[in-house]
Image (cartoon, rainbow, N blue to C red):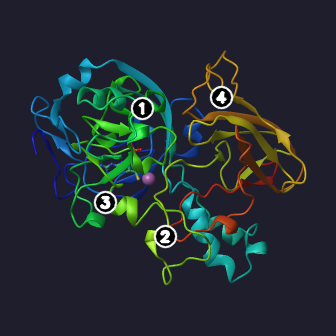
């Protein structure tokens, strides 16, 4: 593979920030503490969640690195980094969210069901078990628009098919994934999305103004804004224009949303489409389970985000299980009022929210967001439970205990 190779073990993985909470070392999967997410609108690179399925690839010679674009195109080509950097550069602020964000809380649901979820849900034992993933972070991605790259090889803007019948764009990496039997990670998006400049799909070589680092896809990665992170392929090696969507494991046997009635004994993967856009989501990040607070006013801060470029219309916070709600304020950039779906707002990025609530007693504080299409987060995780534990977007809650000591 010119310039880009994948080691077969983890000994050459890069060093990482000590504050990351490691969910698995090999492959390296880690998330920042939730408080880090609300310290800044754009997440620092070293604290950005890292989701890998194999050892981190290595670029031994950036001069030799190229991306091959072939398949159902008339003019297949190899593009060097220079070719890609010559195209107009765009900076797109976009939140990347793993479909598995908040999965741990979902998996606990079924396990505790037998012993009484209603009571356990607010009991101590359950709370100790409960750990929420924070696999959602925002970055400014710098790179070329995929629509411009495809135009270079003769595919016009807003094309839904090529002359030879290509309708999907497949991104292939070089990392060795056990789910692919040692083969590379891959995914695809529809050609119409890839050739739409407004969809802002990037081949990114920068993250937050710096050269992309190895963990996040150096030298080049795909960023598909508004879509689950799984489609934003890192360490891009080749692009194939294909007739049907990618047949890889992560498109066909993972990252699909099944109903609660489907379990491992009755699953038929082909009945569902690969998940693309993510639904409306929010999480409280200023409090952990369980924080002790002084009785009285408590600030509640967190993030809210929706897929498909939909803005966040509202975030509601409740301290009485959803009987009454306080509306939070929302913001992206300091000094610019956030208006959902307005040109002044970053359509692919989260909003941070803040509300001040009155907490007289021990309680659970919950938040739910509403997007610009009036989609709202479901109350209970049971109603959206799915065997792969993806897209837990149920109301996010944190337990608080009222106390007076050590404050
Ligand atoms: N080549 C490659 N690309 C990949 C993955 C991977 O394991 N290999 N993981 C995907 C998943 S599931 C997610 S959520 C995002 C995570 O991107 P990040 O590590 O930059 O946060 O990358 C996606 N792209
Ligand atoms: Mo993911």
Residue 303: image location, x then y, percent: 64, 39
Task: Name the residue tied to disc 1.
Answer: 158
Judge depth for marks 2 and 3 and give the one in front. Answer: 2
Give me the residue at 73% from left, 75% from top: 117
The relative height of residue 7 versus residue 116 in the rendered view (above or below) is: above
Disc on the earlier residue, 4 or 3: 3
Cα–Cα gap, marks 1 and 3: 40 Å
Which structural element holds mark 2? Answer: helix
Q: Earlier in the sequence, mark 1 or mark 3?
A: 3
Q: Report if the CB atoms under discs 4 and 3 are less than 8 Å apart.
A: no
User: In percent of the image, x 17 and y 34: which residue is there?
Assistant: 75
Figure check: 326 above or below 174: above
| 382 displayed left or right of 388 | right
Task: Please tell me whether residue 226 is drawn above or below residue 402 in the rendered image.
Answer: above
The Cα atoms of the two marked residues, 1 and 2, are separated by: 29 Å
Numbered circle sitting on residue 26 = 3
Q: Is label 1 or label 3 in front?
A: 1
Q: Tell whether label 4 touches label 2 (CB within 8 Å).
A: no
Q: Quadrant of the N terminus?
A: top left
Of the image marks 2 and 4, the number of the one nearer the N terminus: 2
Give the class, few, some or many, for how many residues have Cα within 10 Å of label 4's Cα (few <14, many ≥20): some
Residue 119's image quarter?
A: bottom right
Between disc 4 and disc 1, the foreground one is: 1
On the image, the x and y values in percent for residue 212 come to: 31, 32
Separation of disc 4 and disc 3 at Cα? 40 Å
The foreground one among 361 and 191 is: 191
Camera-nearest label, 2 or 4 = 2
Which mark, residue 341? 4
Of the two numbered discs 2 and 3 on the same chain, state the one appearing first in sequence.
3
Quadrant occupied by the C terminus: top right
326 or 299, which is in the foreground? 326
At label 1, counting other C-alpha atoms closer than 10 Å, the crowd grade (few under 14, some 14-19, many 20 or more) is some
């Amino acid at each position: 593979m010119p310039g880009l190779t994948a080691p077969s073990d983890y000994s050459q993985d890069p060093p990482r920030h000590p504050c990351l909470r490691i969910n698995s070392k090999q492959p390296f999967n880690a998330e920042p503490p939730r408080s880090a997410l609300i310290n800044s609108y754009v997440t620092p690179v070293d604290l950005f969640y890292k989701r890998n399925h194999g050892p981190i690839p290595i670029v031994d010679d950036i001069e030799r690195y190229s991306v091959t674009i072939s398949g159902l195109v008339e003019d297949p080509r190899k593009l060097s980094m220079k070719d890609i950097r010559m195209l107009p550069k765009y900076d797109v602020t976009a939140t990347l969210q793993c479909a598995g964000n908040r999965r741990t809380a979902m998996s606990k649901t079924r396990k505790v069901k037998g012993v009484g979820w209603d009571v356990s849900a607010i009991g101590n034992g359950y709370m100790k078990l409960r750990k929420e993933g924070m696999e959602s972070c925002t970055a400014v991605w710098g790179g070329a628009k995929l629509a411009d790259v495809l135009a270079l090889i003769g595919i016009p803007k807003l094309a839904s098919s090529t002359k030879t019948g290509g309708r999907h764009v497949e991104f292939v990496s070089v990392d060795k994934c056990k789910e692919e039997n040692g083969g590379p990670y891959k995914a695809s998006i529809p050609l119409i999305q890839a050739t739409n400049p407004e969809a802002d799909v990037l081949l990114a070589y920068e993250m937050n103004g710096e050269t992309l680092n190895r963990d996040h896809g150096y030298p080049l990665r795909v960023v598909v804004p508004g879509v689950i992170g799984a489609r934003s392929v890192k360490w891009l090696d080749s692009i194939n224009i294909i007739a049907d969507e990618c047949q890889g494991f992560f498109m066909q046997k993972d990252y699909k949303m099944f109903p609660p009635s489907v379990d491992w004994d009755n699953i038929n993967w082909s009945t569902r489409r690969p998940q693309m856009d993510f639904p409306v989501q929010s999480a409280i990040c200023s409090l952990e389970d369980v924080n002790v607070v002084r009785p009285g006013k408590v600030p509640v801060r967190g993030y809210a985000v929706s897929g498909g470029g939909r803005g966040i219309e509202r975030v509601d916070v409740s301290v009485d299980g959803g009987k009454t709600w306080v509306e939070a304020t929302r913001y992206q950039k300091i000094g610019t009022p956030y208006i959902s779906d307005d040109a002044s707002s970053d359509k692919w990025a989260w909003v941070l929210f803040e509300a001040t609530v009155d907490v007289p007693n021990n309680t659970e504080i919950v938040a739910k967001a509403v997007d610009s299409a009036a989609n709202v987060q479901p109350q209970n995780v049971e109603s959206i439970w799915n065997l792969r534990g993806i897209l837990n977007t149920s109301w996010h809650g944190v337990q608080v205990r009222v106390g007076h000591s050590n404050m």
